[in-house]
Amino acid sequence: MKKVRILALDGGGIRGIIPATIMEYVEKEIQRKTQNENARIADYFDLIAGTSTGGILSCIYLTPNPDTSAGGPSTMFDASEALEFYVKEGYKIFNASKLGFWKRLGGLKNATKFSPDYIEKLFESKFGNLKMHELKKPCLVTTYDMESKSSYFFVSNEPKEMKREFYVRDVVRSTSAAPTYFPPARIKNLATGKEMVNIDGGVFANNPAMCAYAEARNTEFKDRDINEPSASDMLVLSIGTGGGNFELPELQKSKKWGVLNWAKSIPEIMMDGSVDTVAFQMNEIFGTLDKKEDQMSFKRIKVPQEAKDMYLPDMSDASPANIKNLQRAAALTLEEAKKDGRHHGLDTFIDLLIGEDKVV
């Protein structure tokens, strides 16, 4: 029986190196096993959902190749280029964009740590005028709409009557506007001209797996001939970024924290708080299915504690040394993911992905 293949990518700033490394391995294994050097992530997933750094990766994986002549790849970027984006650009996005003390006055005048100038130019050069509906496969990216004070989901396959269309560059700017890191994103709905002021979707869904599940439940996947699939009709890969290792200043004195201590701590608390909860909920949903093969259809890749100890807890530290440590942590996470865990290892999951492509 056919299954809808779903990829969900957590938020986590420069720690996006970890899921990017995992997905580079997945793509290369697919290419090796299918003997197709042009195989891409977008060819083997029917829906990709991402928050913050995961939202950026989602859109990179799904950017269509404008020239598919002579059997070329379906997307412009391969998974190695997505990983390179973080390794090559991370320092300029974060460390080199840090605002000076006098502009911030220690956070009293401006709580934002980084200027968005470089990352906005980078997104514009990467995605140009690409619109959400032009992405290769259905895509969901989270943000928080400050004007309506509610969660908001950028969805690429919405019907035109919904009157919601956005530049991809604005979508990734919105989902990665972490409070106290980057200022809110001011963008425009191209279908209505209405302006929005958005912040990082990680404030409510740093693990977007449940959002992806809900979106899939209400989607018709015409390519798979599946309408509004249930859990037994899904194959889900969810990848974390290794959060939860941050330090809280003077924890014993937290009841007397001032504005600055809370400002430094709230983003990490909010973004990490829901991650394990969502993973638990997804495991429970798939654990209730009757068939063992259906129970195996959800795989969550977590960063092991020994890997977390390798890099700094600050998700904006993109110094060369920390990037190397993140690459080491990613390699260890990959090796752990390949081991048989609760149900199966990553290599078995890749076989399931490939097998689904052959189901008639």
Image: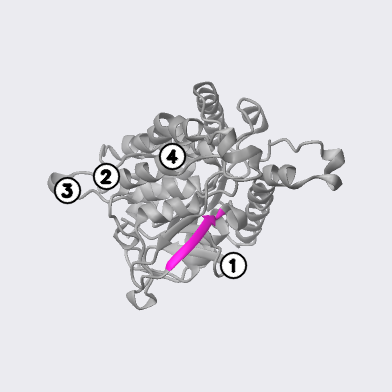
Few, some or many residues within 10 Å of mark 4 (<14, 14–19, 20+): many
Tell me the CA gap for discs 2 and 4. Answer: 16 Å
Q: Main SS type for the magenta part?
A: strand
Tell me the CA gap for discs 3 and 4. Answer: 23 Å
Which numbered disc, 1 or 3, marks the residue closer to the eye?
A: 1
Which numbered disc, 1 or 2, marks the residue closer to the eye?
A: 1
Can you tell which mark lies on residue 67?
A: 3
Which residue is pictured at 36% across the width and 46% down the height? 123
Instruction: Provide the secondary structure element on which disc 2 rests.
Output: loop
Which residue is pictured at 63% across the width and 55% down the height? 278
* Residue 220 seen in the figure: yes
Residue under numbered circle 4: 23
Marks 1 and 4, the one that precedes in the sequence = 4
Residue under numbered circle 2: 76
Coordinates of residue 238 in the picture (x, y in percent): 53, 48
Instruction: Provide the secondary structure element on which disc 1 rests.
Output: loop
